[in-house]
Image: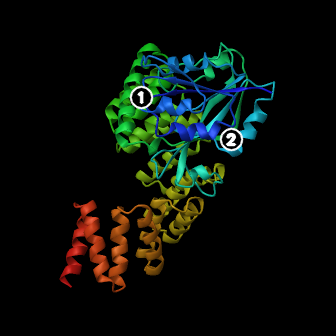
Amino acid sequence: MAKISLCMIVRDEAVFIKQCLNSIVDLVDEIVITDTGSIDDTKLIASKFDAKIHDFKWSDDFSGARNSSIERATGDWILVLDADETISKKDHKKIRTLIEDNRLDAYSLVQRTYGDDLKHSKYIPRGNDSYNESRDYAGWIASPLVRLFRNKPEYRFRYKIHEVIEPSIEESNGEIQSTEIPIHHFTYEKPSAFVEKKHSRYLDYGLQQIKLTPNDPKPYLEVALVYLEDKEYENAEKILLGAVSIAKENADIYDALATLYIDSGRPADAERVVRKGLSLRPDDVIMLNKLASTCMARRAFDEAERLLKQAKKISPEYQMVYNNLGLLYAINNQPEKAISAFKNSLKINSVNAYALTSLGMLYVNAGKLKNAQLVLEKTLKIMPDDPKAMYHLALVYAATEKKTRAIKLLMRAREVLPTDPAISAKLAELKRV
């Protein structure tokens, strides 16, 4: 029977590492821990799982640390995890079956980065997911990654950050197969200060990587995404235009540029680059949605509807399609169609705060106050500080003789959004009456 070595790099992961190791201790035959300078109980916890622990002097290079770890593995196969990740026990048998196939050299698994209402184009709502690991979250961002591969000396990681092993496997003519087995990733459970520090560090490493490999578009994209998260649009644009100059046929670059231009209020530029991206990847649902958004911005509603229906046909379970259809019908004065679209979005993800708030607002405008109250109260259980939901629920309370509740809700809404004139005006009106 083939043996599996778990290989990890860690630093100050005492909060998470026990959960990780508990999830795989019955699957793997060996645990190899590469510690890059922990000062907490990380190594002590790992030692209780009979891990082979060695120290590695950090050199601003994740691939260097990864490769130091796998060089110490003795198993036939290597499984790579981070301390804030787990593998469900119900997938152990599947993994064991995979590694008995002599034809294949590596498998990609799907890393699920869990979170609530994460602002990401590849966010997947939880829906009826069967994994217990997802039950406390609205959804996840999905990223296929090769994390299970044969232990061969020619298979090594590359890049200082966002390190990958795929290029070395492909160059050795190794065969990679995709799987749907998830890696459960809980990075947003870490303190915000930790995440921010990591964010800054990754930006520095990414800029270093661009200097090392100036003709590789991958680090350009990764650095640009960091800038986008920080709303540093000028820096993001500079990096992405640099990427275009070396990889004119890379659809991901045009997709990222479209996000940049949409977020920075440049819909005409967004439309131009997303059309280029779609010429390279015509069935990309995310870019079809972005193009529809740019069409709505110039009130080309028929084209926007056609694009969204095309996206829906390609990916009928993609929540964003229905959110955008709801928005399209709402601004185009088709409230019943808008209500239907947002209901369809909620069938996919019943805790989608955007769809709930939008549906509640439509019910208020249609005079369906009971429906509006139910939807908006549910919204505020999910997003307690949503000022739009608070304002419209206050309108419902005021119209149904719940004046005191309406005033309290408007006062809360004003604390969250003190510059909103509608909130202040309605609050003043109710206090006068």
- For label 1, count other residues whose C-alpha is less than 10 Å away and answer few (under 14), some (14-19) or many (20+): many
**How many numbered circles are shown?**
2
Query: Regarding mark 1 in the picture, which secondary structure is present there?
Result: helix
Asked which quadrant contains residue 98, the reply is top right
Q: Position of residue 397 (x, y in %)?
A: 35, 80
Left or right of residue 242: residue 16: right
Of the image marks 1 and 2, the number of the one nearer the N terminus: 2
Q: Position of residue 374 (x, y in %)?
A: 47, 75
Q: Nearer the viewer, residue 320 or 380?
A: 380
What residue lies at 46% left-to-right and 60% top-to-bottom? 353
**Amino acid under disc 2:** Glu
Q: Position of residue 197 (x, y in %)?
A: 35, 33
Which residue does the numbered mark 2 point to in the structure image?
180
Q: Do callouts 1 and 2 mark residues in contact (Cβ within 8 Å)?
A: no
What residue lies at 47% left-to-right and 15% top-to-bottom? 213
Which residue does the numbered mark 1 point to in the structure image?
223
Q: Nearer the viewer, residue 372 or 112?
A: 112
**Amino acid under disc 1:** Val
For marks 1 and 2, give the one nearer the viewer.
Answer: 2
Query: Regarding mark 2 in the picture, which secondary structure is present there?
Result: strand
Asked which quadrant contains residue 386, the reply is bottom left
What residue lies at 37% left-to-right and 27% top-to-bottom? 201
Measure how far apart labels 1 and 2 are at the Cα level.
Answer: 28 Å
Q: Nearer the viewer, residue 44 or 224?
A: 44
- For label 2, count other residues whose C-alpha is less than 10 Å away and answer few (under 14), some (14-19) or many (20+): few
Q: Position of residue 111 (x, y in %)?
A: 58, 38
Q: Is residue 152 above or below residue 411?
A: above
Q: Is residue 263 above or below residue 102?
A: below
